[in-house]
Every structure is written in C-alpha cells, then in structure tokens.
C-alpha cells in the first residue's frame, strides 16, 4: 500500500501539471457556500480527475478545486468537500487539505453550514469558530505519522489563529456584518442528532454542530497551517428547532446568507 505522503504527492503532481501557480491561501467552501469560487477565474480541476482524490457525493457540493485570486491573494478554493459519513477514511477526508498545503498554501479559511446548539444563535448567523471538539470522531492523524507534514503528537491548544480571528472581527466590523464566536463540535453524521445528544453537547461546551471542518482543522494544524473558520448557522439543532431537520433547509438558509458570507470571506482573504 502506498503511503499517505505518496498519495498526496501524486495528487499534487497532477494539479501542478494543470496549473503551475502555487497558492498561498486555501479556502474550503461548505454546503450551499460554493458560490464564492465563482469570483475566481483560474483553472478548475474536478476531484474525479485527480488520481487518488476522494470525490464528494453530496448534493450542494460541486467537487472541484478552483484556482484564482481572492482578495488579491493567490488562492485555491475547494468547491465542495468529502465527509467521513460518505465512507472515506479520515486520512482520505483530509487528503485535499494536505494537498493544498503541499501546493504551497500556508493559510487556510474553512467554512461550513452548522446547526446551532447555542440558543443565542439564529439561522443565517455567521459564527467564527474559536475552538472545536473532535473527540466524537476518529482523529485524522491516526495511523503512520506523515512526518514530512508534522509531528506525531501535535499541539492543539490554539488551532484557530488568534491573529486571524482578530482580523476577521475587524473585517466584520468594517463591513457592518455581525460575526459571533463559538465552539464547534464534529459528529460523524450522516444522521442529524437527537435532542438528548444536543443537550449533551450543550453541557460539554459546544455552540454549534456539524459533520466536517474540525478534522480538517486538526490535519491543517498538524501540517503547520494558520487557520480561521466560519460557520453559517443553517438551523437550530434538534430539540431546539421546532421542525424536523433537512438537508434542503440547510442549503436554502446558507444560500440566503451568502451575500454577507462572501463579503466577509473576501475581505478576510485580503487582510490575512
Ligand atoms: N447537525 C449536524 N450537522 C449539521 C447541522 C446539524 O443540525 N446543520 C448543518 N449541518
């Protein structure tokens, strides 16, 4: 079996052949948020054409890398991501993050749609991730350590860059966009949570819940990237919401929030 490092190199070589430019910034666009990449006018590479790249199967996730400029910075954006619940291993789920790192990106903006556990949040809110709880899914770093990327036992005491968070807060203030802050908990999905699970998560200190992002942040931190992450609240979590949760609702609300979301991420890309 080839090593994870070799798999990353194969993806990287394929991409560099199609597009010589080395990005400095990587952006991951979550469910219903991929429209931001339409502002970028460089090469597009579908995941399915890249040898060894996992392919997203979820509606609302286009499944390609888009290269170009965002906020004046050479950027690679992921329009769609893969999730653990699709059946990929955690190493496969975070492979695109490591590929973007190997391409040269040392800054990362992660985005997602999330359910609000904190009852002070509302659908459509933008919330910066201050920290995460990854303990309910396998670590993406399990297995042989990719020592070319990082340490066996990486520190996770400041995954989300205080410098970038400060800049994001200033960007939001300049744009007159409300930006809240909270702790993100990752579940495996694909089922949404029960009200009892949400109650447990609330007591553990989580403010929002989702099925991605924290594993990507852990892999990126391991690889030495500087990370910032923004959730769009797509629904109140189970038990708080009076109605049943659905993926189409998640997409509809995130699409509605796309104007302030895109303005914030563009400005953030420029200022970091
Ligand atoms: N739970 C888990 N993941 C989610 C949710 C949720 O309520 N909303 C969007 N992604």
Image: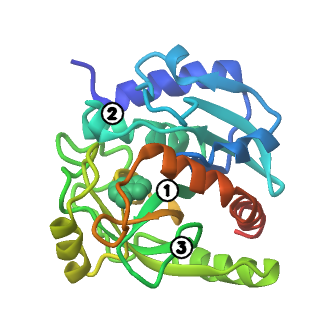
> x and y percent of residue 75 in the render?
70, 46
Specify the quadrant of the image occupied by residue 82.
top left
Taking the image as four quarters, which one is ligand 1 found in?
bottom left
Above/below status of 229 relative to 9: below
Query: Residues under labels 1 and 2: Cα distance?
Result: 21 Å
Specify the quadrant of the image occupied by residue 240.
bottom left
Q: Give the position of the C terminus as an image quadrant.
A: bottom right
Residue at 26% over, 46% down: 191
Query: Residues under labels 3 and 1: Cα distance?
Result: 10 Å
Using the rendered image of the protein, determine whether residue 178 is visible from the camera's viewpoint.
yes
Label 3 CB-ligand 1 distance < 8 A:
no
- How would you rate the neighbour count of disc 2 (Cα within 10 Å): few for under 14, some for 14-19, many for 20 or more? many
Depth check, mark 2 against mark 3: the one in front is 3
Label located before the other in sequence (1 or 2) = 2
Residue on which the image places disc 2: 92
SS under mark 3? strand
Label 1 CB-ligand 1 distance < 8 A:
yes
Comparing 38 with 105, the one in front is 38
- How would you rate the neighbour count of disc 1 (Cα within 10 Å): few for under 14, some for 14-19, many for 20 or more? many
> x and y percent of residue 146 in the render?
30, 42
25 on left or right of 227 = right
Residue at 50% over, 50% down: 249
Specify the label residue 127 is tagged with.
3
Above/below status of 246 relative to 179: above
> x and y percent of residue 186 in the render?
30, 59
């Amino acid at each position: 079996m080839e090593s994870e490092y070799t798999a990353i190199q194969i993806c990287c070589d394929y991409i560099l052949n199609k597009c010589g430019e080395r990005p400095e910034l990587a952006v991951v666009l979550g469910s219903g948020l991929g429209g931001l990449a339409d502002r970028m006018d460089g090469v597009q590479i579908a995941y399915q054409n890249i040898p060894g790249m996992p392919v997203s199967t979820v509606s609302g996730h286009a499944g390609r890398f888009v290269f170009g400029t965002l906020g004046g910075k050479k950027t690679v954006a992921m329009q769609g991501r893969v999730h653990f619940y699709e059946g990929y291993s955690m190493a496969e789920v975070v492979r695109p993050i490591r590929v973007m790192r190997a391409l040269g990106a040392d800054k990362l903006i992660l985005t997602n749609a999330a359910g609000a556990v904190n009852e002070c949040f509302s659908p459509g809110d933008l919330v910066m991730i201050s920290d995460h709880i990854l303990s309910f899914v396998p670590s993406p770093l399990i297995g042989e350590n990719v020592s070319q990327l990082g340490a066996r036992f990486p520190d996770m005491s400041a995954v989300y860059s205080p410098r970038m968070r400060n800049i994001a807060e200033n960007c939001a203030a300049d744009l007159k966009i409300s930006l809240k802050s909270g702790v993100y908990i990752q579940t495996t999905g694909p089922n949404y949570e029960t009200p009892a699970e949400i109650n447990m998560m609330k007591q553990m200190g989580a403010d929002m819940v989702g099925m991605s992002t924290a594993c990507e942040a852990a892999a990126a931190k391991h690889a030495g990237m500087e990370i910032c992450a923004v959730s769009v609240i797509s629904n109140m979590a189970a038990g708080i919401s009076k109605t049943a949760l659905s993926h189409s609702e998640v997409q509809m609300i995130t699409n509605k929030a796309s104007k302030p979301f895109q303005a914030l991420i563009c400005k953030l890309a420029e200022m970091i």
